[in-house]
Amino acid sequence: MFSWPTNYDFCYTLAGVISKEGVGLHSGEKTRVTISPYEKEGYYVSFRDKPNEIFKLTQDLIGSTMLCTAIKLGGRNLYTIEHLLSSMAGCGLSFIHIEVDGKEIPLLDGSAIQWVRAFEEVGMKKAPKPDHFFREINKSIILEKEDSIVVATPSEKTTIISTISFPYKAIGTQTFVIDLNPQSFVEMIAPARTFGFKDQFQELSELGLIKGGSLENALVCDGEGWVNPPLRFDNEPIRHKILDLIGDLALVGLPKAQMLVYKGSHSLNALLASSLKN
Ligand SMILES: [Zn+2]
């Protein structure tokens, strides 16, 4: 049986080709993604209607919309890429080509688990180089944005200590600590779904912004409780925040660092990613 590595000492690629389709969060249209091994390090994207135009995903192409992470490729935007990036980085995968038929990556169930299960089906193989997956850092980094803060210090492994605090009984204050590696990512982080709030959900639906949003692809909180229980973990929200952080760092490489994150967000993660790059 396939077993996940317990460190990022090696870099892997897929041993076969996977394909998945689903509904796009923004458009509500069906979109299909085919992922295969590629000869170059990193993540590469092409669109089905222009197969010869292959773009390398880099941090400077990343933008964000109100709802998701988007990446600008040859004059068009590819939306909702963050959970797929998290799945690949969390599993230690690089040397990957992604072909997209549509404008978005399907949201699937709002977590990373369906990507991970698809990777498991075809298996992984060691990439030709480099001989490690993580990014070395040699100095500590401290970054703040409003009341959020992130501290990253060099370490022997990749550890994340993350806290969120919401004034809603259903979420409250949650902290999660993880020594990250492909195995712990798959078991503890990948199944955690994205979450949102009922009033926000209604507002966005009325504006026509989340045509593909449903109770099947996000946990919805009404303050006191959850509209669509059961949760997969008592602390599913903080685990999903870590899933997002991993996705936001995927294009610069997961640092060999201890990271403390208080009230993390995509914009704080983006600050950390650009400071790791320099
Ligand atoms: Zn997310």
Image: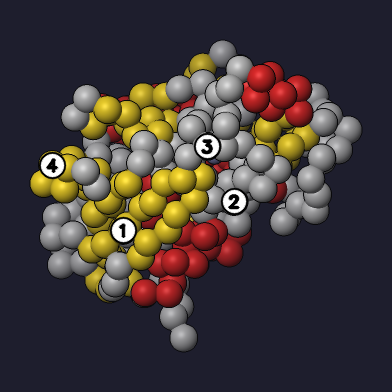
* Element under disc 3: loop
Element class at badge 1: strand
Lower sequence index among marks 3 and 2: 3
Q: Measuring from the top left, give residue 242's x and y in whole percent.
A: 55, 44
In primary-sequence order, the first of circles 1 and 2 is 1
Under mark 3, the amino acid is: Gly
User: How dense is the environment of label 1, judged by Cα within 10 Å: few (below 14), some, or many (20 and up)?
Assistant: many
Tag shown at residue 28: 3
210 left or right, relative to 272:
right
- The type of residue carrying mark 2 is Asp
Badge 1 or badge 3: first in the primary sequence: 3
Q: Residue at x 35, y 41 (%)?
A: 102
Image mark for residue 53: 4
| Residue 153, visible in the rendered structure | no
Question: Which structural element holds mark 4?
Answer: strand
Q: Are marks 4 and 3 in contact (CB under 8 Å)?
A: no
Q: Which residue is mark 2?
A: 109
Mark 2: few/some/many CA within 10 Å (<14, 14-19, 20+): some
* Badge 2 vs badge 4, beta-carbon distance below 8 Å: no
Q: In the rendered image, which residue does mark 1 sit on?
A: 35
Cα–Cα gap, marks 3 and 2: 14 Å
Mark toward the viewer: 4 or 3 = 3
Q: Nearer the viewer, residue 180 or 56?
A: 56
Does label 4 or label 1 sit earlier along the sequence? 1
The mark nearer the N terminus, 4 or 3, is 3
Find out if the beta carbon at label 2 lies less than 8 Å from the nearest ligand 1 atom. Answer: no
Front position among marks 3 and 2: 3
Picture layout, residue 18 above or below residue 23: below
Q: Position of residue 246 (x, y in %)?
A: 45, 44
Disc 2 secondary structure class: loop
Closest to the observer, 111 or 108: 108
User: What's the distance in space between the residues labelled 1 and 2, CA to CA?
Assistant: 18 Å
